[in-house]
Amino acid sequence: MITVAQHAAYLAVCAMLAFSLPHSALGNAQGVLVVIGVIGIWRYGWATTNFLRAALFLNVVYPRRRARAEGAYNARTHPAHAYFLTTSYKIEAETTRRVYRSIFQAALNSPGGATIVASVVETADARLIQRIFDTMPMAGSGVTLILDQIPGTGKRDALARSLRLISRQSPSRRDVVIFVDGDSCVPEDIVARTAPFFTDPRVGALTTDERVEIANAPMFRDWFALRFTQRQMMMSSMGLSERVLTLTGRMSVFRADLATTPDFIRLIQHDFIEHWRLGRVDFLTGDDKSTWFWLLRAGYRMVYLPDVASVSMETQPRPGFVDSAVTLMIRWFGNMLRTNGRALALPARDIGYFTWWSLMDQRLAIWTTLAGPIGVLLTALFIEPWVLPAYAAWVMFTRYVFCAVLSLFRGGGFPITYPFLLYFGQIVGASVKSYVLFRLDRQRWTRQSGGRSGGFATAIGARMRGASSLFAHCLALGWLTFGIFFLTGIL
């Protein structure tokens, strides 16, 4: 619950910290304040740019684009046939019921008919999905269900096999393939809301807003809600350029003739990078990054629909909030960084200069985010301890303002936990990114383990790679610390 008293108390503590500082404290810590100020101007300047772009997109550009797309789309003469591709593995039965009821209802509402390909591993899931389908009014509806029970070899194999099943039906350019995770509900009008955008032959895929339902974990729920609010803002900013930075795995929509090309399917199933130190790194997770990179490299536009939203049923993967958040961050940021390098290698003029710089900022933000707290800790240790409450006041105030602006993209204010969760996400997120950046071979699903396996030689190789990763990580942090020592004048 959002209360005025909580916000008043928060701002009072912020002011108390700021005004309790002795006059000499800021002068003694002048070096670190200059460094934090310069970095702050850069970071908040970049944030302001994205805020303004998002506002322009939501209020001016997107309504015009939707009107233009719907005006060009004729659902009566050339309706899109929708292919729903859903993967389910170790998901609770009640969640499966909700998800497939939403998919079947969306399929019934598809003007051009629909085909649902449900990829499952367990027989119980196949039986449950069939029972749900049989209870729906499907007779004469033009909706077909294909249950594909497969070995549990991973989501990438499941997606590739399902796409090959769809390709046998020879979908046309106006048809769509909707990728849906087994824990995400789709809007009932998803086909009517998304198909018009594919009348533009330059559009290869689109993704939508996301909402989340989490029971019995209030801190985890607030953290996810904050992340999705940040996502709405950043996706809207990137949507202005018609090249989003990810095609979300929970629910994204693709042009059917592109999603069923052999090269597209092959990249999903067998994506990898060659790393100078780690060798070949086969992708286990991050299928949404593979589909995104294929379209980015091919020059297709990927658009964002802020007025359409899927609903995900999340559960906390670990008993504690911090452990759960770090577990998810390792997977998310690993997927991002494994694809980031090869995307940056594409010519900026081809993918768009703003898109290219946004990709570059994903890497730079790791070190600029860590520089502030490292500089403050070093200054407090060697020069002026009073810099700690000054920094706390700065963090509390700036994150509060940031959350207040973010709340404009959802409405209804924000809980007082948001500023703390925002700072947690920034600092812990940057730390996790720096860890993953030097360990791109470490991969793990939440419900499925992954990684290298083998005999003694493989184990020795893994140990050597681990040692080299630790050395490279420590070296990078050492140079960052030395640079802060030098720039702040502590030396």
Image (cartoon, rainbow, N blue to C red):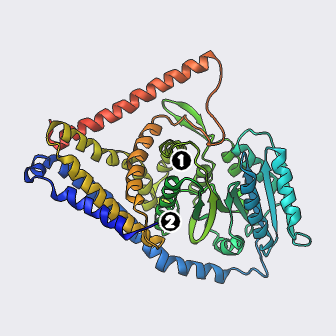
Looking at the picture, which amino acid does disc 1 mark? Trp
Q: Position of residue 344 (x, y in %)?
A: 47, 49
Q: Residue at x 49, y 43 (%)?
A: 326
Residue at the extreme front: 5
Q: Position of residue 80 (x, y in %)?
A: 76, 72
The residue singled out by tag 1 in the image is: 332
Q: Secondary structure at mark 2?
A: helix
Q: As displayed, is residue 480 above or below residue 67?
A: above
- Left or right of 371? Residue 491 is left
Residue at the extreme right: 139
Note whether residue 464 is visible: yes
- Crowding at dot 2, Cα within 10 Å, few <14 / some 14-19 / many 20+, comes out as many
Separation (CA) of disc 2 from disc 1: 17 Å
Q: As displayed, is residue 471 above or below residue 134?
A: above
Note whether residue 48 is visible: no
Comparing 342 with 48, the one in front is: 48
Q: As displayed, is residue 374 above or below residue 220?
A: above
Q: Position of residue 229 (x, y in %)?
A: 48, 64
Disc 2 + disc 1, Cβ < 8 Å: no
Within the image, what quadrant is residue 308 found in? Answer: bottom right
Comparing 321 with 424, the one in front is: 321
Residue at the extreme left: 24
Q: Secondary structure at mark 1?
A: helix
Q: As displayed, is residue 410 above or below residue 262?
A: below
- Left or right of 109? Residue 237 is left
Q: Earlier in the sequence, mark 2 or mark 1?
A: 2
The residue singled out by tag 2 in the image is: 232
Looking at the picture, which amino acid does disc 2 mark? Gln
Q: Which mark is residue 314?
A: none
